[in-house]
Amino acid sequence: MTRFGWLNAVSLTFGFAFLYLPILILVIYSFNASKLVTVWGGFSTKWYVALFQNAQLLAAAKMSLLVAVVTATLATVLGTLAAIALTRARRLPARTLFQGMTYAPLVMPEVITGLSLLLLFVALGIDRGFWTITIAHTTFALCFVAVVVQSRLTAFDMSLEEAARDLGASPVKAFCLVTLPLIAPAVAAGWLLAFTLSLDDLVIASFTSGPGSTTLPMRIFSAVRLGVSPEINAASTILIAAVAIGVMTATLAAKWGARRETRSQ
Amino acid sequence: MPSSSNAEARAGRGGRRVLNASFVGLLPYVWLLVFFLIPFLIVLKISLSTAFYGQPPYEPVLDLAEGVGATWEKVKTLSLGNYTFLASDSLYVEAYLSSLKIAAIATVLTLLCGFPIAHAMARAPRGWRPLLIALVIMPFWTSFLIRVYAWVGILKREGLLNAVLLELGAIGEPLTILNTNFAVIVGIVYAYLPFMILPLYAALERQDPALLEAASDLGSPPWLAFWQVTVRLSVPGIVAGSLLVFIPAVGEFVIPNLLGGSNTLMIGQTLWNEFFLNHDWPLSSAVAVVLLVILVVPITLFQRYQAREVE
């Protein structure tokens, strides 16, 4: 047994302070009546009121949500299929190429991905808008889904699916009824990851969007380039709260699920 | 067909035929070919073209419908002009070098910040660990743009950090931190820290604490045992985490744009400006191709690690 030690405790305290203080400050100042960061003008929700009257920002938020939902769904299907192929196919043609294309977008600088997709859309003569952003987002998000699902699939006991086949289920049925429910948490995590990645992306969306398809990060970016804006702080706080609630629910659900699993054994 | 031979291979091993994996992979495979690989070939082609005032703003525009002969005539007009321009203009050379330098410094600092945190997480009581991991992942789920923007209010001249330092009497007058390379480095360390912590934690968590005890039983002082056992054994995590930070940081756009100043030179921003402000598509394509060539070695290293990690 090793002792946790004061050094480790200090590392954790400073580490998490560094990670969370900037976010906390941002949240606090979204309730500041004064526009200045250093002056506390009293508690106020006026920036939230202004936010909900900002039609441009709301339209961009709607656009972003729509892109993110479609992206997450497409990326989850494609990414799960890619994960199955990479984990199970023993003789995958051009495996290295496929593997390379699946992992490279995880680290590829966004400016390169954005530029290359834009040039493709121009070469094909496609008008830029909702679908070009969605296709671009799906392309990099599917790789994240593939990695998440693949790590679950490698640990998966194949004999379960084979048993279903022995009992006469078709390959598709065996997969959908046996494997899919068991890897569902990873698939759901993949969907959420793809959703947030899409919702968050500025660079790739800037390259692939057209007139009338401005996303939320693009609006936020053009607002904050000129300095601190309390209205954007308010928008950020809402986004952060949504994410925090989502992550906590997921963590609790996973914990609850694990407890139920151990109890049933 | 490779798919049927795959099924035979499975049946031959005594297994039952399950969902045909090669066939299933076809859809994502085609998707990635069309939307990931082919676009790079287009970037390469356009980087050899010349800027042209019109739509699309480059020439020649290849069109096979004009016949093979006419297309070939156009192909012959492609040139390396954009690349010789990049090499001759010191602005671009400096932008590449300074991006690599900033990314390297930031990666080392991220490692130095991330290691103690990952180490403490791996040694924390087992029951705490899921919560600690969730706490590291949570900022990663929060908008990157917002997290970078949060530093503007902290680092600027009338910002929070200067106000605190002035109040404490540590400085006589406000420091200029925002719009410097230092602010860019702080931004990179902050934004990419979770990417460093998670692979480090994965490597550290696997280690058996008994190894350290064995080293000290054999007479090794704690610092030496730490170095030779803990650090040595976490090299895969160190390499993976560093690559996850370094590669995207070299081409970073948002951080230098929001936190950097007029003398911050980073190639992602240069590419962005060439494209959106100067509308020089061929030159920005050439910038992208050179950036990719610079990053091809670290990207390949990362893919190897990732392939090993999931298998």
Image (cartoon, rainbow, N blue to C red):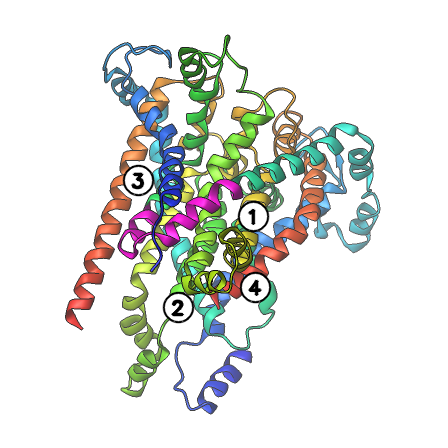
Tell me the number on the disc at residue A232. none
Tell me the number on the disc at residue A98. 4
Mark 2 residue type: Leu
Q: From which residue to which does the magenta span run?
A: B111-134
Mark 1 residue type: Ser
Q: Is label 2 on the same chain as label 1?
A: no
Ranked by sequence position, the earlier of labels 4 and 3 is 4
The reply to whether residue B195 is in sight is no
Q: Is label 4 on the same chain as label 1?
A: no
In the shown orientation, is residue A232 left or right of residue B226? left
In the shown orientation, is residue A148 left or right of residue B175? left
The chain to which mark 3 is attached is A
Label 2 to label 1, Cα distance in Å?
Answer: 26 Å
User: Which quadrant of the figure has residue B290?
Assistant: top right
Label 3 to label 1, Cα distance in Å?
Answer: 27 Å
- Residue at (31% x, 79% y) in the render: A160
For mark 2, what is the residue?
Answer: A153
In the shown orientation, is residue B257 left or right of residue A2? right
Near mark 3 (Cα within 10 A), the count class, few <14, some 14-19 or many ≥20, is some
Ranked by sequence position, the earlier of labels 2 and 3 is 2
Near mark 1 (Cα within 10 A), the count class, few <14, some 14-19 or many ≥20, is many
Q: Is residue B133 magenta?
A: yes
Tell me the number on the disc at residue B242. 1
Label 2 to label 3, Cα distance in Å?
Answer: 27 Å
Q: Is label 4 on the same chain as label 3?
A: yes
